[in-house]
Amino acid sequence: MPARNRKLSKKTGPSFPDSKNTLSDRICQEAARLLVDGEAESLLRAKKKALNHLGFPSDTPLPSNKEIENAVQSRQGLFHAQSHRNHLEKLRRTALEAMVFLQSFNPHLVGPILEGVILAEPELQLHIFAETLENVTHWLDQQHIPYQQTEKQLLFGGNRHKNIPILRFLADTVMIELYVFNQLGLREAPLDSINGRPLTRANGKAVQNLFNKLEISEIQGQ
């Protein structure tokens, strides 16, 4: 029986997945592990430690914060589902209590805890609205709440940047960050630095609905 002629492929090497995506995925997973295990206190620190642990050069392109937050959320759901759910519920209840306490400033929850992501040192981020910054600081002084004041530059539509004052204080063991906007600030949310979309804000009713959805999912899972 004559031998069949076999066409040789011009591609002589083995097939590998895209190296860039593979590197990014490995950095994401290692950074997420460091954050979940409490070995890194911030996203930036987790990225740098991940590069070091994996032996990658310091100039290796890094994944976005959102990609790492998604990896953290997936890891917590996979390896620490019940403890993650309990911790998230506790943090959101703390947020709700803070929002009731600050109700005269129309507080809205934003950031990782709203999205369901818990970092090693979680911070509650609230957007509040007042005629002046002094209205808020005077109110905190009246409540005998010590706080630290700083500011952060945020991006808005039209490539506009604004410095927004931030007041930070501890509630039990949780750090709360108040981003203080003027009364018109409720009309326009700052943009996410990663995807360029307006940040999601949740008022007290929306945060309470998160608990209702959680309770329903727990009942359905029984």
Image (cartoon, rainbow, N blue to C red):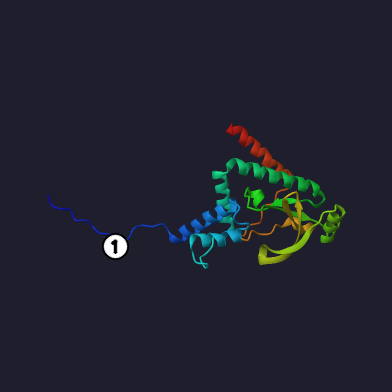
Q: Residue furthest right?
A: 142
Q: Nearer the viewer, residue 203 or 19?
A: 19
Percent coordinates x, y for residue 111 in the rendering: 66, 53
In the displayed structure, does residue 69 sit left or right of residue 203?
A: left
Residue tagged 1:
10
Up the image or down, 190 lies above or below 211; here it is: below
Secondary structure under badge 1?
A: loop
Q: Quadrant of residue 134?
A: bottom right
Q: Is residue 170 visible?
A: yes
Q: Quadrant of residue 142?
A: bottom right
Where's the C terminus, which quadrant?
top right
Q: Nearer the viewer, residue 109 or 177?
A: 177
Q: Nearer the viewer, residue 13 or 76?
A: 76
Percent coordinates x, y for residue 173 in the rendering: 72, 50
Label 1: how many Cα within 10 Å (few below 14, some 14–19, many 20+): few
Q: Amino acid at mark 1?
A: Lys
Percent coordinates x, y for residue 21 in the rendering: 47, 58
Residue at 52% in and 54% down: 29
Q: Residue furthest bottom?
A: 59
Up the image or down, 211 lies above or below 32; here it is: above
Q: Residue furthest left?
A: 1
Residue at 78% in and 55% down: 129
In the displayed structure, does residue 136 sit left or right of residue 23?
A: right
